[in-house]
Every structure is written in C-alpha cells, then in structure tokens.
Image: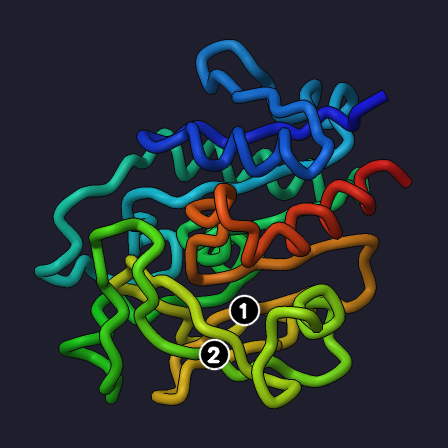
Amino acid sequence: MSPIIAVAPCRSLPDYVESIRRAGGEPRVLDPAQDQPASVVGEIQGLLLTGGVDIDPTLYGEERHATVTAIEPERDVFEFALLRAAREARLPIFGICRGLQVMNVAFGGTLVQDIESQAAGILPHTVAAPPCAIAHEVWISKGSRLWTLMQEQMVDADTCSVNSRHHQAIKNLASGFEVTATAPDGVIEAIECPNSAFCLGVQWHPENFWRTGEFRPLFEGFIEACRQ
C-alpha cells in the first residue's frame, strides 16, 4: 500500500502531487478549514511542506521589509502547528522553498527577508520561467542525506545544478538542524535534522522536474522513509 503523504496547500499544487505519485506515495492535499493538525498526523505517513508566499516576519521577531508584500497569517499558523505535530509524531518531513523556511522559523530560526538588499548574494535566486530553468549550482555536504540521495546527479562528487524562485533565505539556523547545501554566494540551500527518519528542506523546487527526473531521488528517499 502506498504511504499517504499530507501536502500543504498552495497555489501551484500539480507538480508536487505528481512528484509524490511518481515516487510511490499517495498525496492527500490538506484543507486548513477541515483538517486539524493533531488529527492529521495520525492518518498520514509523511508531510510535504510546499512553496508559496513569505512567512510573516513577526513570527521571527522582525518588522516587515518593504519587499514582503504578500503574507498569509492563517497559512503560517496552520503549517507551524502541522509541522510541530509531525515532528512530535516522528513522521518524515520534506520541505520545499517556503517549506524549508517554515521548518527553520517554526523551531526558532530567522530569515533574510530580501536577499538582494540585505545579503551579499551575487547569484540569481529568482528565475521565474520556465519553472525548471537552471539558476545556479549548489554545494552539498558530503555524507549528508541530501548527498546520499543525489549521488547520481552530482558533478565532481559534491555539486548539482538547481532552479530557483525565492527572494528570502535562512539567516539564523534553528537549533537541531544542520546546513547541508549552500549556493556559491553563501545562501543556504538545504537543511537537515540528522537525528530523524527523514527531515530535509531544500530551497529550490525539485517538484518542477518530475517529467525529467533529475530530483526524483529526493522524493523516492522521502517516500521510502514514509514506508518504514
């Protein structure tokens, strides 16, 4: 039987859903109006946190930067509660783009609200179209879960090329996580919780590659952890 994967709702669901299905999981798109996090975690085998709008900066103790023009406070509340319930239940968790940022902020980390104006980024981190356009490479920490899963796709044993659609990034890392990938300009591109069945977040959008399979190993590794 395919493991049931809770998918946090967002405006661009099809690629996430198809990526889960192709990796062997059964996606269940959640409805914040109906699904209670405490109940959901007893009915699923894994949690996928999707991309989307910025997290409300007040949740990590900052005033809103001028570039933060769209937030969804209700989504923040729902996803933070969902994530904490999933962690308490020791469920595998995979966070993508905003999902990585939710993982960080929910457990005490902070964000750079705008890379271009607040950090020394020199690479393009917002390449909107096409969705799978390559933006830059990432350097992956040897021995990490990400490194293990991406072996066949890496160049020179520690780098791979990714797409990118974000203007924010991790500033202070939450306790219990490790940085396992960075862009050449220092922007954090992946984090993991090492003492877990599967708790991985990436800043790029691997779901956009479901047709060509470059990042299918990430979804397959996630689903395999959910089976166990």
Name the residue at 77% across, 68% down: 194
Q: Secondary structure at mark 1?
A: strand
Q: Earlier in the sequence, mark 2 or mark 1?
A: 2
The numbered dot on residue 138 is 2
Q: Position of residue 121 (x, y in %)?
A: 26, 84
Q: Alpha-carbon distance for marks 2 and 1?
A: 9 Å
The numbered dot on residue 190 is 1
Q: Secondary structure at mark 2?
A: strand
Q: Quadrant of the N terminus?
A: top right
Amino acid under label 1? Answer: Ala
Q: Quadrant of the C terminus?
A: top right
- Determine the image quadrant of residue 183: bottom left
Residue nearest the observer in this picture, 56 or 20: 20
Mark 2 residue crowding within 10 angstroms, few (<14) / some (14–19) / many (20+): many
Residue nearest the observer in this picture, 15 or 59: 15
Q: Position of residue 178 (x, y in %)?
A: 64, 75
Name the residue at 36% across, 62% down: 163
Q: Position of residue 128 (x, y in %)?
A: 21, 54
In the picture shown, does residue 48 fall above or below 205?
above
Name the residue at 44% across, 62% down: 203
In the picture shown, does residue 9 fall above or below 160?
above
Amino acid under label 2? Answer: Val
> Pointers 2 and 1 in contact (CB under 8 A)?
yes
Q: Is residue 30 left or right of residue 217?
A: left
Name the residue at 69% across, 74% down: 147
